[in-house]
């Protein structure tokens, strides 16, 4: 069955917007990529930083594009953020392939920060997951893309940009996304280089000509280019699937968080500003986050959130019997995942026990 023949509608969750957050709750927190990195603005010198950094930021008005009919969002202090890594080949990204005029979500992570902002759950969504994509109006072109039945998850970004990606995630999960953060290949590399590289240890050799990465077993400090190669690697580790690559990405994100703490991002104003300057140029966010005023306080808010406080899983899936290159959601297990996030609780281990996402074979390659 082709993806074109699987078109059908999708019923969306409905609900009202949460009330305006209190002043104290305007202090935002974010974990990035596969993101990719931490967007942090704060410390001293904010008068100068405001004018310098505010001009760097790019925002997308997702709320205007999506309008009403979104899931309800209870004002309990928790945050839900969709983090996307775009595979755009435009501009400086052309070194990684020909620009075909569109991009897909190469990496997708749903970050849930708990009410007390002391722990976080991160759910990676395999890009090849077959989902029901709702009809979407692009936030950039204003064009409408028809709903599609069992089409690849990463096509949502391709046909409708950030707004369609958010709408698809909200339709799948029944959870309203408070924020959206996107980073492309070049932005990711610059963020890692600004941190001075990221330390990782490999238990086996990695040699992937497609991602241009060659590493011997042992400990390495990866540059931005090498880090990009690692999170794009799939053919030389595990079973060679995208599920194995997600496991590498999750291990890298934790190493990235540890690196950010070790170089004094949260205590050295100069280091903080350097990262903030790079990060604000590298990312695209929802319009609510696209000002320095909204981003201040991130550093203090994230001080207590280390890699040990972050639980990372892959959305429970199974291989599609009609096409081994595609995966299908495990609906019962997925409901457990979304219910845990809605209730601001850890995702139960039982939810992922039967998932192909835990069997990619790359989970112990990097630490």
Image (spheres, rainbow, N blue to C red):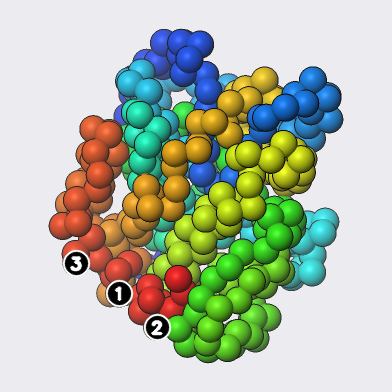
Residue 87 image-quadrant placement: bottom right
Residue 86 horizontal/vertical position (percent): 62, 54
> At x 19% / y 64%, what residue is drawn?
353
> At x 52% / y 28%, what residue is drawn?
28
The one of 169 and 44 positioned closer to us in this rendering: 44
Tell me, yes or no, whether the two marked residues, 1 and 2, touch with CB atoms within 8 Å: yes
Q: Residues within 10 Å of mark 1 (few under 14, many from 20)?
A: some
User: Vertical placement of 128 versus 289: above or below?
Assistant: below
Please report whichever mark, 1 or 3, sits nearer to the chain's N-terminal start.
Answer: 3
Q: In this view, does 339 lie to the left or right of 248?
A: left
Q: Is residue 67 visible?
A: yes
Q: How crowded is mark 2: few (under 14 residues within 10 Å), some or many (20 or more)?
A: some
> At x 50% / y 80%, what residue is drawn?
202
Callout 3: helix, strand or loop?
Answer: loop
Q: How crowded is mark 3: few (under 14 residues within 10 Å), some or many (20 or more)?
A: some
Q: Can residue 171 be seen in this view?
A: no
Cα separation between marks 1 and 2: 9 Å
Please report whichever mark, 1 or 2, sits nearer to the chain's N-terminal start.
Answer: 2
Which image quarter is the C terminus in? Answer: bottom left
Q: Is residue 245 left or right of residue 358?
A: right
Q: Residue 359 carries which label?
A: 1
Mark 3 sits on what residue? 354
Residue 32 horizontal/vertical position (percent): 55, 47
Residue 346 horizontal/vertical position (percent): 25, 44
Mark 2 sits on what residue? 239
The one of 10 and 295 positioned closer to us in this rendering: 295
């Amino acid at each position: 069955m082709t993806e074109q023949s699987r078109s059908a509608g999708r019923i969306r969750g409905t609900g009202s917007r949460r009330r305006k957050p209190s002043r104290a709750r305007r202090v935002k927190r974010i974990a990035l990529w596969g993101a990719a990195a931490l967007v942090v603005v704060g410390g001293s010198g904010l008068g100068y930083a405001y004018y310098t950094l505010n001009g760097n930021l790019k925002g997308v008005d997702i709320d205007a594009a999506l309008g009403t009919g979104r899931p309800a969002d209870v004002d309990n202090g928790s945050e839900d953020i969709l983090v996307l890594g775009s595979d755009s080949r435009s501009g400086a990204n052309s070194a990684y392939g020909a620009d075909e005029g569109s991009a897909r979500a190469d990496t997708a992570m749903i970050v849930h920060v708990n009410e007390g902002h002391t722990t976080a759950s991160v759910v990676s969504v395999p890009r090849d997951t077959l989902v029901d994509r709702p009809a979407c109006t692009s936030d950039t072109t204003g064009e409408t893309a028809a709903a599609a039945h069992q089409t690849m998850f990463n096509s949502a970004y391709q046909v409708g940009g950030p707004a369609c990606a958010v709408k698809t995630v909200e339709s799948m999960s029944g959870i309203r996304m408070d924020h959206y953060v996107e980073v492309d290949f070049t932005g990711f590399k610059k963020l890692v280089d600004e941190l001075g590289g990221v330390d990782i240890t490999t238990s086996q050799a990695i040699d992937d000509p497609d991602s241009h990465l060659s590493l011997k077993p042992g400990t390495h400090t990866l540059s931005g280019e090498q880090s990009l190669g690692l999170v794009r690697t799939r053919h030389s580790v595990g079973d060679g699937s995208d599920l194995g690559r997600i496991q590498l990405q999750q291990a890298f994100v934790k190493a990235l968080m540890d690196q950010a703490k070790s170089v004094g991002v949260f205590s050295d104003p100069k280091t903080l500003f350097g990262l903030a300057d790079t990060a604000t140029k590298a990312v695209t966010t929802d319009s609510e986050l696209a000002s320095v005023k909204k981003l201040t306080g991130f550093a203090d808010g994230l001080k207590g959130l280390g890699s040990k406080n972050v639980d990372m899983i892959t959305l429970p899936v199974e291989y599609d019997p009609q096409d081994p290159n595609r995966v299908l959601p495990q609906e019962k297990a997925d409901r457990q995942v979304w219910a845990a996030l809605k209730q601001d609780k850890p995702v139960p281990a039982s939810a992922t026990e039967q998932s192909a996402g835990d069997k990619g074979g790359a989970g112990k390659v990097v630490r």
